[in-house]
Image (spheres, rainbow, N blue to C red):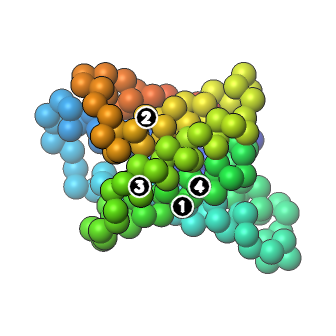
Amino acid sequence: MSSGTSLVGVLLAIYLFLIGIGLFSVAIPVAIPVAIPVAMGMLALAVGIFILIGRFVPAPAITSNRRRWFIISGASPAGVVLLAIYLIPIGMINLFSVAFPIGAIGILALAAGIFILIGMKFTKNIGMLLLAIYLIVDGLLVLGLNIGGFVLLLYLVAIAAGIFILIGK
């Protein structure tokens, strides 16, 4: 892990890696432990909540040294907040089978990806670029785009995004 990677970055990286592994198991029939969807739900919920804590809790409540635990650098603040708003229902769906309108989830993913792209420097943060690509394509898939067998590439993008975020690149 890079010394510059925040706690939220590490949790997001693990979540993306599990997304890639979990989705590969759907495409290639392999039994995955029941714990993986539960872990994905817990991570999605935690990352979403931690991002919102880092953005909206007043400075005196969190010391500046601890605030960096909750920051995802390399993307626009609006994109990161939309990512948090997207991840919280995803976590609740995985953990509690809560019903959310699927179209709203797709629109949140699409918006988060677009806003992350708007506020980033492409050569500085490959992990965030890959995360934005993943979110945009995932949002389009949820909204009805059919890319056939190329969906396997999306899983690789999720895994690569997690790895690059984890190493701080």
Label 1 – label 3 distance at C-alpha: 9 Å
Q: Residue at x 64, y 41 (%)?
A: 116
Q: What is the x, y in percent for residue 166?
A: 59, 38
Looking at the image, is mark 1 or mark 2 earlier in the sequence? 1
Which structural element holds mark 3?
Answer: helix
Which structural element holds mark 2?
Answer: helix
Check residue 105 in the rendering and tell me which mark sits there, or answer none.
3
Looking at the image, is mark 3 or mark 4 earlier in the sequence? 4
Label 2 – label 4 distance at C-alpha: 16 Å
Which structural element holds mark 1?
Answer: helix
Looking at the image, is mark 2 or mark 4 earlier in the sequence? 4
Residue 114 falls in image quadrant: top right
Whether residue 149 sits left or right of residue 93 in the image: it is left
Three-letter amino acid code of the residue under disc 4: Leu
Label 4 sits on residue: 82
Q: Characterize the local packing of mark 4: few (<14), some (14-19) or many (20 or more) Cα atoms within 10 angstroms.
A: many
Q: Are marks 1 and 4 in contact (CB under 8 Å)?
A: yes
Label 2 sits on residue: 137
Q: Are marks 1 and 3 in contact (CB under 8 Å)?
A: no
Q: What is the x, y in percent for residue 90?
A: 40, 58
Label 1 – label 2 distance at C-alpha: 17 Å
